[in-house]
Image (cartoon, rainbow, N blue to C red):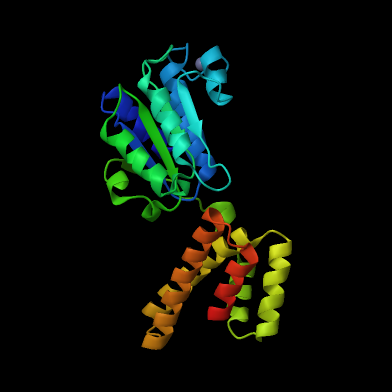
Amino acid sequence: MPSQEEFLWKAVQAGKLAHAYLFAGNDAAAKRQTAQIIIQRLNCAEKSGPCLVCRNCLDIKNLSFPDLAWVFPEEKEIQIGQIRQLAKALSFAPYMAERKYAVIEQAHAMNAQAQSAFLKLLEEPKGSALILLFCEYPALLLDTIQSRTQVISFFRFGDNALSQDATETFLHLHSAPFAERFAFAKKTAEAKRVPDVLEQWELAARARLLWQVQDNGSVEEIQKARKILGLIGEMRVDVAKTTVSARFALEQVLIAL
Ligand SMILES: [Zn+2]
């Protein structure tokens, strides 16, 4: 059993399940898997479940379980209407489960009004709902939302570990002529690979900054590396959350190298 699932299951068994959890980190697949399995275990017809084949297990998997609301961004944002709808759904007594469940994917995509509405929901919990917020960028959530949730980390390494190629390209482009940098941005945007490249470069930039700090890079070098790391983080958020073009975002990073 993955450690996050075990952690949640122990809380269930101890009767100490919190009202809301923030699933932080970049491993979207593991977040979904964990949320699904925990909700299945809580509702499976088999005591030693989840069996994955009973009606409840299947309905949860297919997101058709009546006591489960799963919220996704619409057009890159989660609107206040979606949160109001969720609040209404949670205000009813559960149909068949012991409690209602809500999962919010990409919670950082809640716009300002949606976040305020959501905060209200957290402040005035109705019944015994379990709310799971998935969020890759918790810093974009109101502090008051963060402080009312319990954080569980989901970070992915392995297939998205820093590749040698990405590091070499990143370092090479630091001293490449601007024409080459812009050509790289165009090509990467056309291949729709900007989010992947920025994710890799964030890892590369962090490694470079650490290396400079440990190896006594000059103050200017360290400052520049820190600035680039911050910029890549900002651009990743912009690409994920706003309508800013991926190519433009990548160009901003390439100009700053
Ligand atoms: Zn089952």
Direction from residue 82 to residue 9 in the image, left or right: left
Q: Residue at x 56, y 25 (%)?
A: 61
Q: Is residue 188 above or below residue 66?
A: below
129 or 170: nearer the viewer: 129
Place of residue 222 in the rendered image (x, y in percent of width and height, measured from the top left): 40, 81
| Most foreground residue, 104 or 21 | 104
Q: Residue at x 54, y 55 (%)?
A: 240
Q: Nearer the viewer, residue 237 or 14?
A: 237
Q: Nearer the viewer, residue 223 or 124?
A: 124
Whether residue 221 is situated above or below residue 252 in the rendered picture: below
* Image quadrant in which the C terminus is located: bottom right
Q: Is residue 181 left or right of residue 237?
A: right
Residue displayed at 40% across by 45% down? 113
Image quarter (top left, top right, bottom left or bottom right) of the N terminus: top left
Q: Is residue 69 above or below residue 170?
A: above
- Determine whether 199 is above or below 138 in the image: below
Q: Position of residue 209 (x, y in %)?
A: 43, 75
* Residue 257 in sight in this render: no
**Quarter of the rendering containing residue 239:** bottom right
Location of residue 25 in the rendering, given as x and y in whole percent from the top left corner: 44, 50
